[in-house]
Image (cartoon, helix red, strand yellow):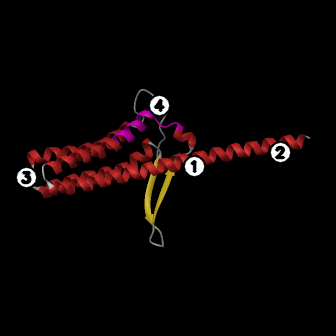
Amino acid sequence: MSSTDFGEVSRPAGENYANPKTCFFHVLFKAAALAFYILSALFVDSFVIIFVVTVLLAALDFWVVKNVSGRILVGLRWWNEINDLGESVWRFECLDQELLARMNKKDTWLFWWTLYLTAVAWIVLGIFSLIRFQADYLLVIAVCLTLSIANIVGFTKCRKDAKKQIQAFASQTIASRFTSTIQSAFSVV
C-alpha cells in the first residue's frame, strides 16, 4: 500500500499531534453522540428525535473512524464484504513497515483510547438505562454500541493482520539474506 492511498503520512512523534484536524473529527462525533444522548433528557421530550439524532451522530462517527481517521492516524483500513458463496469475508490493508514506524504516537494513542473509551461509555449508559428501567433507550445504546464495537473489531483484526504481515516480511527478509549469504560463501569456494 503506498502512502498516497492513505493520504499524507504522519511525521515521527513529537510534541504535538501530527494530524490535529483528523484527531478533532475523530473525537467530535463520539463526543457529540454521547453528549447529545446524555443532555437530551434535559431538553428534548421526544424519544424519536433522541434516537434519530444520536444514531445519526454515531453513524457519522463510525464512518469517520472507519474511512478517514483509521487510515490517517494509525495507517489501517478494513472492510467486510460478502463473497459469491454468501460468506462474510474481512479485508484488511495497512501501510508498509517503514510508514507505520513513522506514525505519530500521540495520534495513535488518541485513536485507540477514544475507540475503546467510547464503547465503555455506551456500556455504562446502558447499565444506567437498565437500572432506570428505560428499555426504549437501550435500543439507542445498542445501536451506538454496535457501531463502536464494529470499529473496534475491524481495527483490532486489521492490526493483528498487519503484525502477521510484518512478521512474514521479516522472516522472508531474514531467510533470503541467510540464503544469499550461504550461496555467496559457497560460490567463493
Q: In the drawing, does residue 21 fall left or right of residue 56?
A: right
Q: Nearer the viewer, residue 2 or 170?
A: 170
Q: Are marks 3 and 4 in contact (CB under 8 Å)?
A: no
Residue at the limit of the structure toward the top, as seen here: 15
Q: Are marks 3 and 2 in contact (CB under 8 Å)?
A: no
Q: Nearer the viewer, residue 129 or 105?
A: 129
Mark found first going from the N terminus, 2 or 4: 4
Q: Which mark is in front, 3 or 1?
A: 1
Reading the image, the residue beneath label 3 is 45
Q: CA distance from mark 3 to mark 2?
A: 78 Å
Q: CA distance from mark 3 to mark 4?
A: 46 Å
Q: In the drawing, does residue 25 fall left or right of residue 7?
A: left
- Amino acid type, mark 1: Gln
Which numbered tag is attached to residue 183?
Answer: 2
The vertical placement of 52 against 69, above or below, is: below
Reading the image, the residue beneath label 1 is 165
Mark found first going from the N terminus, 3 or 4: 4
Reading the image, the residue beneath label 4 is 13
Report the number of numbered marks. Answer: 4
Magenta residues (range): 101-114
